[in-house]
Image: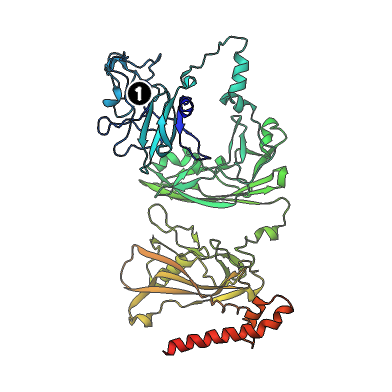
Amino acid sequence: MCISQLMLLQVFFLMVPEGVWLQPSSPSGAAPTPSDVGPASPGGTLQSSEGSETPWPVPGISTVGPTVVTPSAPENGTVDLFPALPVCVCDLTPGTCDINCCCDRDCYLLHPRTVFSFCLPGSVRSSSWMCVDNSLIFRSNSPFPSRVFMDSGGVRQFCVLVNNSRLNYFQKLQKINATNFQALATEFGGESFTSTFQTQSPPPFYRAGDPILTYFPKWSVISLLRQPAGVGAGGLCAESNPAGFLESKSTTCARFFKNLANSCTLDPALNAASYYNFTVLKVPRGMTDLQNTKVPVTLVSQAGSPLLSGNICQNVVSQVIYEIETNGTFGIQKVSVSFGQTNLTVEPDTSLQQHFLIRFRAFQQSTAASLTGPRSGNPGYIVGKPLLALTGDKSHSMTLLQSQGDGICSVKKHEVQFGVNAISGCKLRPKKVDCSHLQQEIYQTLHGKTSPEHVAIFGNADPAQKREWTRILSRNCSVSAMHCTSCCVIPVSLEIQVLWAYTGLQSNPQAHVSGARFLYQCQSIKDSQQVAEVALTTVVTFVDITQKPEPPRGQPRIDWKLPFDFFFPLKIAFSRGVDSQKGSASLILILSLLVLGVLKLETK
């Protein structure tokens, strides 16, 4: 009876615990193929062939050490020299063996895996393996090829190659004709480049940062409002920089001319007319209705055209200031422009530094409100915002030296940013060499025509409220300090030291300036010495003097005390109601005897 039951085993006899199932494994190109692995032996037992052949790893299982494999096909069986693949996708070189192309008939290899390190995808038939832990297998009667592999963790895996012919089916091509072409293109395709560009419409209004559209009626061309900016080490002007809507900012750049005599009247960058010979569109959608959405650019003051008079190029644009008034989603309402002009001497390699400023303000805003500069914080300073200074009754930003492309000191200055240490320098070519005029010119170059007198305590300081400003400590260079009676003492460096601290709640601290001072480094020169150039330097340093308060005291600690009765916890643990209280005395007596016994043992 037992023998007849054993004969019913046809596929597997597995000693598998409850809950353990076969795990499928998808092979890679390195896994065995049906042509490489033959059926199991008639007896169905696994045979060891350690060291006889190199096993092929299954994906996720690395072959380590000797493995147990099933025997290959019988020797008398017919062997196909080439894998039965209808299409060899990696055979790209006719008449030549393509490396790692296991289906290339030009390689004439019986077993390509013994020569190639791996088989390219598509050069072998896809296969499907089912693997379990080898310790669970007692005997295999599977008609499919099987092998035992060693994974990376040293665990042997028993794998069976499943005959899944669906992996090697080819997808049939669809027939395309004029009837179904559009339907398939719509179902599976995406948006084309041309259709997206043609259907895109301009937005109804400007958003912050959007480029501002302009219209040139002379050429009927729509363009953008440009704000040239400096690029590279020399700060050369880049004309393509667009101005952003609601982004008030200032840029500086340099221009160099090899032949200023020709560029004086021909270069549009030097002509003021090129900065207002257009109109501005109120909103981007104005491109569809140019007649009703154009805003002209008005001149605040007349600016002459460039004129070459002898060796001087006159009326050259050195500064451009745009004032743009906006009204929310109704767009731009008014645009005005003003210029700064200068004269240039015609000489080889002449340079010009230009400044461009664009300011936005609300439409119909009062003049007094528009003259008030932006805050640097409300109330506390924000790191990176300008450090506010006060000269007389006028509030402005504290500045540092700025150089042109050739290193000469520029009229334009760098703003001092709160909390940002910085250093800058340039070369000054004095116009007069006598001591008093030289000192005055250097002082004006270092900190402006008039030296700042106060610095704002908070970022929202009002110029009319003097208590919101603190005086800047300063001391100029003196001859007595240099111990030289026939010398001219000039400043060559200015260091701006700012002491600041946080104040207010620790959850929302506000930065404020506690004090500031100007420190000059001086140099003495002989009165008779001719000074052609003076190297100047400005430095700003911020020192945090915040004194953090002591941390708050914690909650009062609870002083835990034990009850006076030492055996109280034991009595509670062993209590079982009123009846248990009668036996509490005996329990205490027993515990006392135990303690006495322990003490006697220790004394012995």
In percent of width and height, residue 375 lies at 62, 62
Give the residue displayed 59% in from the left and 45% down from the top: 244
**Amino acid type shown at disc 1:** Ser
| Label 1 element class | loop
Compared with 29, 174 (above or below) is above
Q: Can you see residue 246?
A: yes
Numbered marks: total: 1
Front-lying residue, 212 or 447? 212
Q: Is residue 405 left or right of residue 54?
A: right
In percent of width and height, residue 263 lies at 44, 40
If the image is split into quadrants, where does the C terminus sit? bottom left
For label 1, the residue is 41
Front-lying residue, 529 or 171? 171
The quadrant where residue 461 appears: bottom right
Give the residue displayed 44% in from the left and 59% down from the top: 402
Q: Is residue 566 left or right of residue 255?
A: right
Compared with 371, 347 (above or below) is above
Front-lying residue, 39 or 309? 39
In percent of width and height, residue 552 lies at 60, 78
Front-lying residue, 454 or 419? 419
Give the residue displayed 48% in from the left and 17% down from the top: 169
Q: Is residue 550 left or right of residue 343?
A: right
Dot 1: within a 10 Å radius of its alpha carbon, few (fewer than 14), some, or many (20 or more) residues?
Answer: some
Task: List the single residue furthest toward the front.
Answer: 1
In percent of width and height, residue 328 lies at 71, 47
Q: Can you see residue 25?
A: no
Describe the colour scheme in one phrase: rainbow
